[in-house]
Amino acid sequence: MSKNYLELNKVDFQVGGITKIKNLSLKIKNKGEIVCLLGPSGIGKTTILRSIAGLEKINKGQIKLKSKILSSTSTHIEPEFRNISLSFQENALFPHYTIKKNIYFGNNRNKENGKKKIDPKKVIKILNIEKILNKYPHQISAGEAQRASLTRSLVSNPDLLLLDEPLSNIDENFKEEIQVKLKKILKEFKITTIIVTHDSYEAFYLGDKCGILLDKTLKQYDEPYNVYHYPNSVNVVNFLNRGVLVPAKVTGQYTLENDDLGLIKGNFVNEHKIGTQVKLLLQPEDLEHDDKSNLQLDIIDKKFKGTNFIYTLKTKSNKNISVFVHSHHVHQHQINDKFGIRKPIHIKHLVCF
Amino acid sequence: MKTFNIWYISSFVISLIVIIPVITVFSSYFESTSDYFELLKNTFLFEYISNSLILLSGVLILTLVIGVSTAYIVSFYSFPLSNFFKWSLILGFAVPPYIYAYSLTAFFENYGTAYTILKNLFGESNYNLFIPKFDGMIGAILSISFSIYAYVYILTRASFYFQSDNLIELGKNLGFTKIQSLFKIIIPSARPAIVAGLSLVAMETLSDFGAVDFFSVNTLTTAIYNSWLSFDDLAFSNQLSFYLLIFIFSLFIIENFSRRKAKYHSPLQGGFKVKKKIKLSGFKSFLAFFICFIILFFSFIFPISQMLYWTFLYPKNFFDLNIQSLIVNTLLLVSLSSIILIFFSFISNYGNRVNKSKFLNFLTTISISGYALPGVILAVAYITFIAWFDNTIINYFEIQSIKKIFIGSILGLVLAYFVRFYSLSCNGIKSSYEKLNNTLDESAYLAGYSKFKTFTNIHIPYLKSSIFFVIILISLEVIRELPITLILRPFNFETFATTAYIYASQDLLEAAAVPSLFLVLIASLFILIISRYILKEDNE
C-alpha cells in the first residue's frame, strides 16, 4: 500500500472549546498536490488550517504528514517544528520590518532545510512586488500586502503550504493572472498545498481536488470537475448555487419526464427505478436556445456576463431556471419576451436526488 | 495544573503587592485608634472633607476651562506659533504643584518679586497693599490647576484631532455656526475624553500633598500625613485614607468607564483625513495667540523665571547644594524603578498574550489599579503593613526584624514606586503590544521561531520605542514624586523634590529655588523627548 503524503484521520477541529468540524478524513496522496477547501464563512475552514499548522490542538483523530504524526490526542508537535507554512487571510506582515525583510524572514527556513531552494527573487518577480520591497507594511495596499505575505510563505519551501483566502484582497482584473502564476510556482516546486477559499472558480482552477465543507462535515471530496458535475448531495448543489433542482419522473433507462419541460434524455449518474419521482439537477449549460422550438418560456431576467448571457426563465409551475447562451449568439430577447428551448432536452449526466 | 505556570504566579504576586495597601487601609478602618480620632472626628474631619471638595471643584473648573479651550484653539485654528503651542502647552507638567506654589508665593508675597519689580520701576512705596495674595485655598487651586491641566489638554486635543472631518462638515451642511458646531458637535463628541482627563485631574488633586501642605490647606491628604507624623497614629491615618479612597475609587471607575468610551473616537488604521485648520488673521489671530501664550506663561514661563531669578540673586544656594549627590540619587531611583517596572510589565503582558486567560487578565486589572492610590496613603499603608507583618509574623517565628530592610530603604522606596507607577508602565507596553497582531507571533512560529526567539526578535524590536517612552514617563513621575519619597526615603537620602520641600517647609523659598529649577529642567527635557508620543499624531 502506498503511503499518503498527508493524512487527516477522523479529526475533530475545535477552537475555543467549540467543535467546528467533526470527524474529518482527508488524504493527499502525492507531494505537490493542491487541495482546495470550499465552504460558507464561519464553518471552520481557517480552524482546519490552524490545526494542521499546529496553532490549535486537536482532541480527536490524527494528523500525519510524511508518515509522521503531527497531532493526535496524545501528540502535539509545536508549529515551529512542523515546517508547515500558513499564509493568513489578514495581513500578517511584521509592521516594523520592510517587505523585503519580511520575505527573507521566511527564507531562513528555506536555507535550513537544505532542500531545493526557491529563489525569492524569482517569486518576487512573478508576483510583481519588486517595487514595494523597501516599503513598510503600512505603506502598501491590501492586495500588495497579500502578495508579499504569499511570497513569504512560498520562499520558505515548506513541506506543506496552507493558504487562507490567499487572493481575497487582490483586484479582480489581476486575480486571474496571479492564480495562473501561483499555480505555476506551486507545481514547479512541487509544494503540497491546501487552499481555503470561498470562490468556487478559484478552487476549481487551482485545486487538483476540492473539498466541500457543510454542516460541520466534509460533504464531498473529489476532483473539481466531479464536484461541479456530480455533486453528491442537495446541500452541495445549493452551496455551489450553479443550477436548480426540478421535479421529474423516471420514465426509462435513459429518460425523465418533467411537467414543464417535457422529455429529458441522458445518462443517469446513479440508478433510479422507473416510475420514481426525483429531483433533477438542471445547470445553465444543460439547456439549448432554439426559437423555433414549441417549448417557449417567459424571460424574467437577463444578465450580460461578457462572454455569455444568462437568461432566467419562468416555467408554468413557477420555477426559475437559468440558461447559458454564448455572447455572439443571435438572441436579442428582452425581459417578458418568450425564449425557446430545444426539444427534446439532452443532458450528458443526469444527476438526480 | 499546567495552567498555573510562571505567568500566573508572577501576575498573582504583582497584584498582591498592589492590593496590600488597599487591604491595609480597609482593614484598619475597623481598628481602634487613639483619642485623637474622636477629637478630630468631631472637630476637623468636616473641615478636611469640605476643603478637599472645594479644592477639587476649583481645580476641576479651572482645568476644564484651560484644557478644553487651549485644545480647541490649537486643534482647529492656525495662527502664529500655533505649532509651537501645540507641544509647549504640555510643559506645565514639568512644574509639580508644590514647586508652582513656591513660585506663586515668592512672586506675590509681601516684599516678594512683584514688590521688587514695582519698586525698581516706580521707586519705594507700600505696594504690598495692592499686590494680590494668592495663598491658602486660591493658591492651592491655581498651583494644582496650572501644573496638571495638561491631562485635560492632551486627552481633549487627541479627541479633537481624531474627530472625523465628516462630522464637522456635516455640521456646516446643517447650517451650524462655528459656535454651534463647537457646543453641539465638537465638545459633545469629545466628552468621554474630557471626562477621562478630568478624572485624572481629580485623582491627582485629591492625592496632592506638596502644594496643599505648603499653603496650609487641611485636606484629607495632609491630615493623613499629619496624623501619622504628629500624632503617631497610623490607624487614624488609615481611617482617613479609607474616606479618601472611597472618593478616589469612584473617580477611578468613572475614568475607566470614560476612557473605554473615549476609545471609540480614535481611528484604527488608515482612512484618516487630517483636518484642515482654519487660518486666522487680524484680531482673532492675536486673540488665539494671546490665550495660548498666557496659559504657557502662567504654567511654565512664570514659575521657571521666578526660580531662575532667585538662583541668580542668591548664587550661594546653587554652590551650597550637593547637586552631584542629588543627581546620583535621582538616577539610582529612576533606573532601579524603570528596570523593575519594565521587567514585570513585560512578564505580565507577555503572559497575557500567550495564555489568553480571563483570570490572568483580571489579575492584571487589579495590579494596575495602584495608580489610583495617593502617594501619602500608599506610603502610610505600606509602613502599616510592614509593621504589622514584622510584629506578628516575623515575631512569631522569632527571626530578625525586616523593618529595616523595607522601611527607610531604597528597596522599600522602589517597591512603593512600583505599586504607584505599575499601571503607567504596564499600560504603556500593553497599548503597543495590542497593536501587534497575534497572527504575527503565529507567523514567526511557523517560520521556525521559538517563543523565546519570537519575543526577542519580533516583540522587543517592535516595542523598543514604547519601552523608551515608558522609561521616560517613569522617570518623569519619579523625579516629580514627593510624598512617597518624603515618607519612605532612607535617612539623609535626598532627591530634588525632597530638598525643595524641606527648604520650602523651613520658609527658605529662595533656597528651594535651585533644586526646583533642576527638577523642572530635567522634567522639561523628558517632556520634550516624549512630546511626539504624547501628542500622538506624528507616529500614527
Image (spheres, coloured by chain):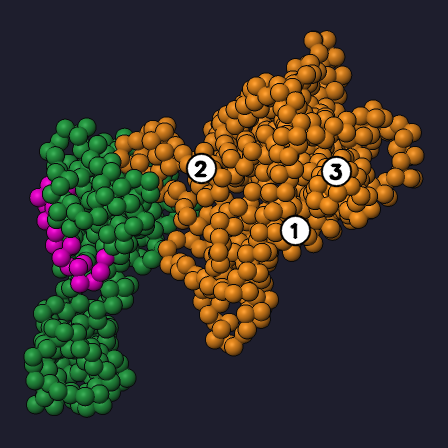
Chain colours: A green, B orange
- Neighbor class of circle 3 (other Cα within 10 Å; few <14, some 14-19, many 20+) is some
Task: Residue A38: give x, y in percent of width and height.
Answer: 25, 56
Task: Residue A147: give x, y in percent of width and height.
Answer: 22, 50
Q: In this view, does B166 lie above or below B344?
A: below
Please identify, in this view, whether the residue under mark 1 or under mark 2 is nearer the observer: 1
Q: Residue A334 appears in which quarter of the rendering?
A: bottom left
Give the magenta part as a residue range.
Answer: A170-192
Q: Can residue B409 be seen in this view?
A: yes
Based on the picture, tell me whether residue A191 belongs to the magenta stretch: yes
Secondary structure under badge 1? helix
Secondary structure under badge 2? helix
Q: In this view, does B492 lie above or below B484?
A: above
Disc 2 residue type? Ser
Q: In this view, does B398 lie above or below A18?
A: above
> What residue is rendered at 66% in x and 23% in y?
B317
- Neighbor class of circle 1 (other Cα within 10 Å; few <14, some 14-19, many 20+) is many
In space, the residues marked 3 and 2 are separated at their CA atoms by 44 Å
> What residue is rendered at 49% in x and 42% in y?
B531
Residue on which disc 3 sits: B112
Of residue B68 and residue B83, the one placed in the foreground of this image is B83
> What residue is rendered at 52% in x and 24% in y?
B335
